[in-house]
Amino acid sequence: MDTSSPAAFVNGALLRRYIGQKVRAVIQVIRSDVGSVIGKSTDDQQIVVKGSPQPPLTTYLEVIGIAETDNTIRAEVWTNFGDSFDVQNYNELCKLANGEFRHLFI
């Protein structure tokens, strides 16, 4: 596993902490436009993901990329996570990975 450039686990609220850095987020796809996907983060905030994923898209996507603004990610990697996903558990993971257990996450 390459640990030279880790991606922080983020939800919509945490994204602003990592502007200019690599992040990973799971979004629920709201719509897909040419060159971007509009989605809802696991804490119900709108996130714009720049880039063009390979179709077909599932309802939930994991995106790894660079946080450009407090609600925009420039995607490097897209992963379909299916049409059913536990957003509450992922949201709690984001909080743990950025809180007191931060040292456990690369």
Image: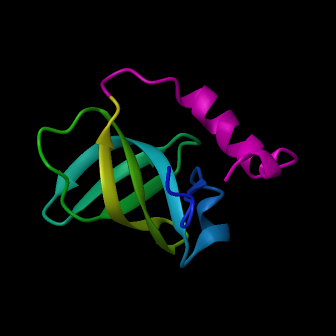
Seen in the image, is 55 located left or right of residue 16?
left
Task: Kindly identify the residue that appears in the image at 13 percent across and 63 percent down.
Answer: 34
Task: Kindly identify the residue that appears in the image at 59 percent across and 34 percent down.
Answer: 90
- What colour scheme has been applied to the protein in the rendered image? rainbow
Numbered range of the magenta stretch: 82-106
Q: Let me know if residue 86 is in the magenta part.
A: yes
Seen in the image, is 51 located left or right of residue 45?
left
Outermost residue on the right side: it is 100
Seen in the image, is 48 located left or right of residue 52?
right
Foreground pick, 3 / 100? 3
Task: Kindly identify the residue that appears in the image at 35 percent across and 32 percent down.
Answer: 81
Image coordinates of residue 80 in percent, x first then y, are: 29, 37
Foreground pick, 74 / 72? 74
Task: Kindly identify the residue that appears in the image at 42 percent across and 56 percent down.
Answer: 64
Outermost residue on the front side: it is 1
- Rendered position, 68 above or below 49: below
- Rendered position, 83 above or below 97: above
Image coordinates of residue 6 in percent, x first then y, are: 57, 60
